[in-house]
Image (cartoon, helix red, strand yellow):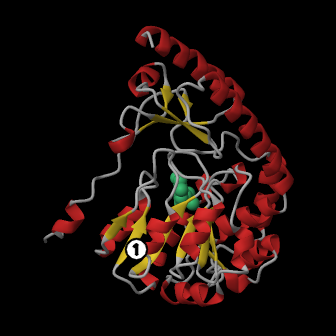
Amino acid sequence: MKIREMVKTFKPYKVIEGNYRIWLDKNENPFDLPDEIKDEIFEKLRKTPFNRYPHITSMPLREKIAEFYGLSPRNVAVGNGSDELLDYLIKIFEGDYIITTPPTFGMYYFYAKLEGIPIVEVPLNEQFLINGEEIAKKAKKASIIFITSPNNPTGNSQPREEILKVLDSGAPVVIDEAYAEFSKENCVDLLDEYNNLLILRTFSKAFGLAGIRLGYLLADTEIIDALYRIKPPFGVNSLSMIAAMVMLDHYNVIEERVKYIVRERERLYKKFKEYAYPSDANFLLMRLNAYEFLLERGIVVRKLEGRLQGHIRVTVGRKEENEELIKALEEFLDVANI
Ligand code: PMP
């Protein structure tokens, strides 16, 4: 037996274990579903035959998402988290390399490395904004370009005029909108105009369904068709599919929670304005080296590295959790004498 050397270059996942009180490290929604919605899901599950495979290309859920956006189901793909869809997106287009815009989400690197596809980086500027012209210059030989808006871990949205410059290159452009529900901006309306635009979304954040692992892609029928040629059959299970479909019927609940989270985000931002960056997502980037300090007080946040060394990314939690965070950070600033 011999494990490939390439596989050994991937680090094992770091599992944070411990009896911590407050988890603000994974950009999750702090609210579980209301009991009535859970009951509705359980009712539907009761009537679902578990001995049968789900739909081979997840059509019932694709239809429901399509209806939500006023698109055709042939414009929608669903996956086991949007992470899984990234894997297939990296595989379906011709080109010499992918383009990413660091500091950004790590999974684009993960799948490109796994596939042995080179990565060309066009870094974000000092304000964490993309340079559309620079990206467009390199787009010709790119198989696919990833832009995250709002960006993780910086929280800001990318300006539409810069995104348009990239789209005008004609190369396939993924706008990863995992956090778009928390922002005033998104690119869904551009789908009509640009057949090279791919919008990636997830049920993990605003929808509060991180545990069911469901993500979706909105794109041209040719792209969705290509994706379903290489995607394993029965890829999304019946249980997750039903939960997501029920949740789409209760979008008003999501909207209420998004409002709450945005309110709390702005409250946190105002408190730590000197150290926090403005955010359009459900988290804040802070220029505070407070990871260990917070951990000692039972609060888990994300510690950042590289260009963002000395920064933390803090998910917006419930009001009482945020209060604890505020108290701990104020204490940190006192102790650090900043
Ligand atoms: N894109 C971005 C920018 C993210 O931050 C995340 C989750 N952290 C994902 C995609 C993946 O989300 P999921 O697989 O839960 O749909």
Residue found 42% across the figure and 28% down from its top: 291
Mark 1: secondary structure: helix
* 59, 310: nearer the viewer: 310
Q: State the image quarter where residue 117 is shown.
A: bottom left
| Three-letter residue code for mark 1 | Lys
Of the four image quadrants, the one with ligand 1 is bottom right
Above-or-below relation of 33 to 288:
below
Residue 32 percent location from the top left of the image: 70, 44
Residue found 67% across the figure and 35% down from its top: 265
Residue found 68% across the figure and 66% down from its top: 187
Above-or-below relation of 26 to 177:
above
* 19, 313: nearer the viewer: 313
Q: Is residue 197 left or right of residue 66?
A: left
Residue found 43% across the figure and 60% down from its top: 107
- Res 118 seen here: yes
Q: Is residue 272 left or right of residue 190?
A: left
* 295, 133: nearer the viewer: 133
Viewport quadrant of the N terminus:
bottom left
Above-or-below relation of 92 to 249:
below
What is the total number of numbered labels drawn onto the structure image? 1
- Res 214 seen here: no
Task: Say few, some or many: other residues with alpha carbon within 10 Å of mark 1 (under 14 / 14 to 19 / 20 or more).
Answer: some
Residue that mark 1 sits on: 138
Residue sitting farthest toward the left: 1
Residue 90 percent location from the top left of the image: 43, 76
Residue 7 percent location from the top left of the image: 23, 65
Residue 149 percent location from the top left of the image: 59, 57
Viewport quadrant of the C terminus:
top left
Residue behind label 1 places its C-beta within 8 angstroms of ligand 1: no
